[in-house]
Image (cartoon, grey):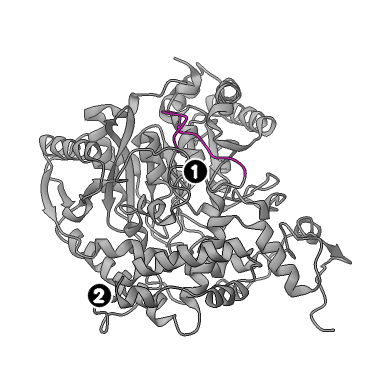
Amino acid sequence: MKLYELTIHEAQELLRKGEISAVELTQAVIDRIVEVDNQVKAYLTVTPESALDQAQEADDRIAAWRKNPANPLDPLTGIPLAIKDVICTAGVPTTCGSRILENFIPPYNATVIERLRRQGAVILGKTNPDEFAMGSSTENSAYFPTHNPWDLSRVPGGSSGGSAAAIAADECLGALGSDTGGSVRQPAALCGVAGLKPTYGRVSRYGLVAFASSLDQIGPFGKDVTDCAIMLQALAHYDPCDSTSVDVPAPNYAQALVPDIRGMRVGVPSEYFVEGMQPAVETAVRAAIEKMADLGAEVDEVSLPHTEYSLPAYYLIAPAEASANLARYDGVKYGYAHPHVEDVWDAYRQTRQKGFGPEVKRRIMLGTYALSAGYYDAYYLKAQKVRTLIKRDFDQAFSKFDVLVAPTSPTVAFKIGEKVNDPLQMYLSDVFTLSLNLAGICGISIPCGFADGLPVGLQIMGDAFAEEAVLRLAYAYEQATGWHKRKPVL
Amino acid sequence: MDKRSQETKLSRVEVEHIAELAKLSLTDAEKERFREQLSAILEYAEMLQRLDTEAIPPTATVLPLRNVMAADEVRPSFAREDVLANAPEAEDGCFKVRAILE
């Protein structure tokens, strides 16, 4: 077995036994990046020198632990990880996939980076996102599109497409993404890896560049469910720097990883099996649900009647919040500033016009319109009321079920260029994921089969702070099927 | 096309007004493209009007948190030079901005 193919939990064991060193492991992953990333293009920035320094520190910690095993070794010690480039890393460029932040070097680490580093994790670099995490294909990056490791002519999904592709191509052991409407789960599905969106408030957003603040949440990608649980354990923590961080103690997620789901109440929302979805996706997801019933889960249909309103509600609320958040890019404090301007207003207009790409401008325009005088009630307020109805649907469903299962995305990975000129078609790619963000609940996408050689994702949704139930079902299904062990050939 | 979808069509003047609110100096081609695309998206969003939400409160955040306060204590902040290192223009330890008044 090649070192870069290891999962986090496999690498952990070998590091503890002293069979490999963190430096060897990190070097193997860096070599892998050099070997395949010219095809995949998952990374915007790779930081091999600091990664190897961090790996050396990890080896020192492991040596100290071996001398004195009374001090426990943190689970992520020496594990090489990739970070979506919308999360601030001190001293390392954080571009958000945008020209407007091309030269931005944060003076501080996001809380999640601090937590990973305190655990001894190794940061390999920054992965390609859609610009400001706005997109479903990573084609909206101002730098280049990322390619799906299963078929390089196809998208990896988005907006955390670089992180998902890096996992699928073995260019890291674990990765961070952010999920505002499906941006962890949808690329996880399209790349055939595991991706978890925690409950809103479970993981600190301090240092995550804001897109839509009532929806944004950082989440982990892993090669399997166990790795997602290990990373969530490191991330889930109350943070006074984020006023929306919730002070609820994190449970021991590893205890949820038991291959026993007998009696678990699994709801199947009928509204998530719609006309227009790819038949092979439905076949794979239906088969997965049957498998859960075989394993002893109590499966039944449930209705989330306002599902069809999620997409229009989301595409008013998220752009409205984005238009407010992105008002800060004025060419004064950081980022691009247009050099030839007449006055202060011209400076703002030119800087933002040249600095932002088409999708970001489209959403700023849409959000500004939805918030503007005379339209606020009809669009933004209306969407917030519909958000209440969507949340109530989930509240009702979770009064009867432990988890809900559905497809993650209506299709497998589509061709690069296929949807770039039709924003509404692109938005439909998130139709099954964004209702969770509106409701603030948690969910995971795990592989559940293939259609025409491309991975299909299964979405497991849980109520707020019900990550354990989600992980338990995901783990039991994964262990019973083994889809996660298939790898693309590069 | 029914009457409502006609009504949701944005005019060129409206697009220019929104662009000015958002401080974007769009090109003519962008104005036309956004006029078409935003009209299509808003037309799609019209489906929300089918729901009677008269008695439904809006959800701005899913959390029950209100008015979260930080402890009122003095702590070190970022070093001035670290913060200004990202500024396009800085002078005398300050961000340099253009004149707002003549």
Label 2, residues with CA under 10 Å away: few <14, some 14-19, many ≥20: few
> Looking at numbered disc 2 in the image, what kind of residue is underneath it?
Arg
Describe residue A182's horizontal placement relative to residue A108 as left or right.
left
**Residue A208, image x, y percentages:** 55, 55
Q: Is residue A194 visible?
A: no
**Is A154 within the magenta?**
yes
Residue on which disc 2 sits: B50
Secondary structure, mark 2, is: helix
Q: As rendered, which of B20 and A106 lies closer to the eye?
A: B20
Amino acid type, mark 1: Leu
Find residue A350 and report its horizontal and vertical position in percent.
71, 64
Which chain letter matches label 1? Answer: A
Position of residue A400 relative to residue A345, above or below, is: above
Q: Percent position (x, y) of residue A249?
A: 39, 56
Residue A176 - label:
1
Q: For numbered disc 1, what is the local secondary structure?
A: strand
Number of the front mark, 1 or 2: 2
